């Protein structure tokens, strides 16, 4: 009766777990909003209250900004304006806006918005007042007043390429010449050398500055496992404690220490300013209202005498968070730039895992196959431990009669019973926890692979067999099948209808591994282990396909491994079969007794 009550309780708790899982995942691992899924799409023109809410924003220590014209504008219309210089680098395309010396148009040539091959490239930067506004501006504060963002600069060329830099320049009424030489490398880094030539008769107090301004509407949601929002290295320490809504509540966040770099991170993309050799007056993050945020990098004021010059260099990164590329920039002096990817505490293990996956992918040409090979390698390395596990299980089986005798002898004295059992383990040299070791070792491996799949852009849109994206949900699920006939399943029911082929294989293979497990279990444990595979089938259905592929492959290898080790330890199979027969006999006896009652 107690076992039946416990089983009903386990079933009820399992049901609550399944029902509550969708809600928990939305809270802790929210899915990107629709804007993120079409990140590079042309802006949607807002109307009504959206227009009224876009008031000019205070720019804080950079002085009062020029009044921003009211109302949003279409992306195509914004990019069709004159006074633009083309950007055409190996991995980056776009344009520079000569109005305000802004880099406000950047797309990535190597990355598409969706898995559809006809979808356009990912857009990182978009002009001000477009729906996905996100841009960088370079300028000067002169005599305490910020240079106008509406000033038109002159360019000495019409294309910025990896081989041809472009210099923007303008002269103010006092005769001071300002210039910004822009160059771009073969990855995602733009270098801006800001110079001042004082040809006036009086000294001038000048502060070069740069900032990144963006909307959070198109940002990736901040998650426990992957930060999205303001980020930077200050005082030699990575700092990313705040999401956008937290920065909005603070209004302004000034991290402690000198900035090495600062900007805004999405899951796969990053925009950041890397400080040059000059000392900074301030480097901080601000909320501007209306879901707009800014990262400021303002250098110390310098008095430039008549006939004197000033020069300061800042780097702007606007591109993909490729681990190898970020590490290259870190090696050139951008402190901890590789930590823009939210590796966390397991970075020491996750990055080598990613390197191994890259190597295997280069070898076989597919990340899905690489994950399978990685699983084989991991299980091969763990095989000696598995052998010891089975040997320990065999030893445990051998001492079972003695354990039962002790339990019977000291059934009224649990403390003495436990002492005698521990003494028996020591005499027989049996470790009851040895069977848990392979599982314990695989927990950090599983978690590390999960983070690698989520964080590494190399996995994004990578296909395998019927799977179009190893980072996404298994597309071969019931919800997609019903969608083909016009039946749309709401998100809260995806925990049931979103189960795909990989999730089913996970449940089946896990159930088979439990059936082959030779360890002795009481009836309640047995019932829980019978339920667990099917609970996990529902729970894991929404996880990355690559993660399920790893787990299913691991289960299949476990089945093969158990079959082999059974052949090496026949006493385990004999004991398991005997135990099973005894349980069937006991259950039949109990059923017969209940029938008579």
Image (cartoon, helix red, strand yellow):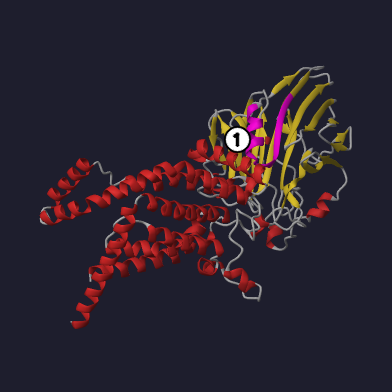
Pointer 1 local density, CA inside 10 Å: few below 14, some 14–19, many at least 20? many
**Is 51 placed above or below 199 here?**
below
**Is 353 placed above or below 20 here?**
above
Residue 244 in sight here: no
Question: Could you say which is closer to the camera, residue 313 or residue 38?
Answer: 38
Residue 224 in sight here: yes
Question: What residue is shown at x 40% (from left), y 62% (from top)?
Answer: 532
Quadrant in which residue 141 is drawn: top right
Is residue 323 magenta-colored?
yes
Location of residue 446 in the rendering, given as x and y in whole percent from the top left corner: 48, 48
Question: Could you say which is closer to the camera, residue 463 or residue 218?
Answer: 463
Question: Could you say which is closer to the camera, residue 88 or residue 144?
Answer: 88
Location of residue 483 in the rendering, given as x and y in whole percent from the top left corner: 64, 72
Location of residue 242 in the rendering, given as x and y in whole percent from the top left corner: 53, 44
Question: What residue is shown at x 28% (from left), y 62% (from top)?
Answer: 578
Is residue 282 magenta-colored?
no
Location of residue 541 in the rendering, given as x and y in whole percent from the top left corner: 52, 61
**Is 208 placed above or below 492 here?**
above
Q: Secondary structure at mark 1?
A: helix
**From the image, which quarter does the N terminus lie in?**
bottom left
Question: What residue is shown at x 27% (from left), y 52% (from top)?
Answer: 397
Quadrant in which residue 385 is drawn: top left
- In the drawing, does residue 271 fall left or right of residue 560? right
Q: Residue furthest bottom?
A: 596
Magenta-highlighted residues:
312-331
**From the image, which quarter does the C terminus lie in?**
bottom left
**Is 114 placed above or below 10 here?**
above
- In the drawing, does residue 536 fall left or right of residue 223? left
Circle 1 is placed at which residue position? 338
């Amino acid at each position: 009766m107690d076992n039946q009550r416990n089983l009903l309780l386990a079933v009820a708790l399992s049901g609550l777990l399944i029902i509550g899982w969708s809600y928990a995942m939305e809270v802790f691992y929210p899915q990107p909003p629709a804007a993120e899924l079409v990140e590079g799409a042309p802006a949607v023109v807002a109307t009504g209250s959206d227009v009224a809410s876009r008031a000019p924003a205070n720019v804080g220590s950079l002085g009062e900004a020029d009044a921003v014209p009211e109302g949003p504008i279409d992306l195509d219309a914004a990019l069709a304006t004159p006074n633009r210089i083309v950007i055409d680098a190996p991995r980056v395309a776009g344009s520079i806006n000569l109005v305000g010396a802004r880099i406000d148009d950047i797309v990535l040539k190597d990355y598409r918005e969706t898995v559809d091959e006809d979808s356009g490239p990912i857009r990182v930067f978009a002009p001000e007042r477009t729906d996905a506004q996100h841009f960088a501006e370079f300028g000067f504060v002169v005599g305490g007043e910020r240079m106008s963002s509406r000033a038109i600069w002159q360019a000495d060329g019409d294309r910025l390429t990896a081989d041809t830099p472009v210099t923007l320049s303008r002269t103010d009424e006092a005769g001071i010449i300002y210039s910004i030489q822009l160059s771009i490398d073969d990855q995602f880094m733009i270098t801006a050398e800001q110079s001042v030539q004082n040809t006036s008769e009086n000294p001038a107090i000048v502060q070069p500055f740069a900032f990144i301004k963006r909307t959070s509407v198109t940002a990736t949601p901040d998650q426990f496992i992957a930060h999205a929002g303001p980020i930077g290295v200050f005082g030699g320490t990575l700092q990313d404690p705040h999401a956008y809504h937290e920065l909005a509540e603070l209004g302004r966040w000034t991290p402690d220490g000198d900035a090495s770099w600062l900007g805004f991170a999405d899951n796969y993309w990053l925009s950041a300013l890397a400080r040059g050799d000059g000392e900074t007056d301030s480097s901080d993050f601000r909320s501007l209202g209306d879901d707009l945020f800014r990262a400021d990098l303002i250098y110390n004021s310098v008095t430039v005498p008549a006939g004197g010059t000033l020069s300061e260099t800042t780097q702007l990164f606007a591109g993909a968070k490729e681990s190898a590329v970020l590490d290259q920039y870190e090696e050139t002096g951008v402190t901890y730039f590789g930590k823009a990817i939210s590796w966390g505490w397991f970075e020491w293990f996750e990055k080598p895992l990613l390197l191994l996956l890259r190597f295997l992918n280069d070898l076989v040409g597919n990340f899905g196959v690489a994950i399978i090979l990685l699983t084989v390698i991991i299980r091969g390395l763990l095989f000696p431990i598995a052998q010891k596990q089975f040997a320990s299980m065999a030893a445990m089986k051998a001492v079972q009669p003695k354990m039962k005798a002790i339990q019977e002898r000291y059934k009224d004295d649990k403390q003495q019973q436990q002492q005698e059992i521990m003494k028996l383990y020591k005499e027989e040299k049996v470790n009851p926890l040895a069977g848990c070791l392979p599982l314990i070792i695989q927990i950090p491996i599983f978690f590390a692979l999960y983070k690698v799949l989520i964080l590494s852009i190399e996995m994004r849109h990578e296909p395998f067999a019927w799977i179009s994206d190893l980072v996404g949900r298994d597309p071969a699920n019931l919800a997609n099948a019903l969608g083909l006939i016009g039946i749309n399943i709401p998100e809260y029911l995806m925990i049931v209808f979103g189960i795909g082929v990989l999730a089913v294989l996970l449940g089946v293979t896990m159930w088979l591994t439990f059936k082959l497990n030779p360890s002795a279990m009481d009836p309640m444990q047995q019932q829980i282990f019978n339920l667990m595979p099917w609970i996990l089938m529902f729970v894991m259905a929404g996880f990355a396909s690559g993660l399920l592929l790893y787990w299913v492959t691991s289960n299949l290898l476990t089945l093969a491994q158990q079959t082999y080790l059974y052949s090496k330890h026949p006493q385990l199979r004999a004991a398991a079969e005997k135990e099973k027969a005894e349980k069937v006999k006991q259950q039949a006896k109990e059923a017969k007794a209940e029938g008579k009652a």
